[in-house]
Image (tube, rainbow, N blue to C red):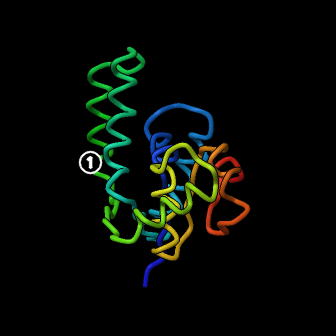
Amino acid sequence: MAARIVCDASVSAKWILQEEYSEQARGLLSDCIATETRITVPPLWSYALDSIIRFRRFRGELSESQADEAFGFIDGMPITVRYLALSQSRAREIAAQANQRRVYDSIYAAHAEIEDCILWTADYEYFRAIRGFLSHVRFLGDL
């Protein structure tokens, strides 16, 4: 079976936006393409990225053409979007264990755990909250 990873929206947004750790995110994506590592994500990923792009457009940080280009880039990515039935209940458990206000960040952690692969995140606060009990999570800033 081919290697695979999960990238949350905080990492994936950096493929298209210039932010802290964008260089590392693009390097991770390039490595995945070069090594044929499959990127798998929960359905939430698509909506989260669309919201990030739309928010940047709304605030005037992206022009209409830049937003359209970003949407096109995301739509063309070789990403495997998979719904995993157990991920929602596991995400609730992870969020509770990490004392998180919301469950959606934990969807990615649950997805990676069920897929038995590494989760990459650029959200240091979330990484810090879960790293003590989830060994399959990596922080993008450590690349």
Sort mark 1 into few (<14), some (14-19) or many (20+) by Cα contacts within 10 Å. Answer: few
From the top left corner, tell me how far across and down residue 70 is, in percent. 33, 36
Residue in the foreground of this view, choosing between 103 and 48:
103
Residue ID for mark 1 = 75
Q: What residue is at 55 percent from the left and 43 percent from the top?
A: 101
Is 80 situated left or right of 91 in this image? left
Instruction: Identify the secondary structure beneath mark 1.
Output: helix
Q: Is residue 70 above or below residue 103?
A: above
Q: What residue is at 43 percent from the left and 85 percent from the top?
A: 1
Residue in the foreground of this view, choosing between 89 and 109:
89
Q: What residue is at 62 percent from the left and 40 percent from the top?
A: 21
From the top left corner, tell me how far across and down residue 110 is, in percent. 49, 65
State which quadrant residue 132 falls in: bottom right
Q: What residue is at 41 percent from the left and 66 percent from the top?
A: 87
From the top left corner, tell me how far across and down residue 54 is, in percent. 32, 28
Number of numbered markers: 1
Q: Is residue 52 above or below residue 86?
A: above
Residue in the foreground of this view, choosing between 64 and 55:
55
| Amino acid on which the number 1 mark rests in the picture | Asp
Is 43 situated left or right of 35 in this image? left
Q: Is residue 59 above or below residue 10?
A: above
Is 116 situated left or right of 97 in this image? left
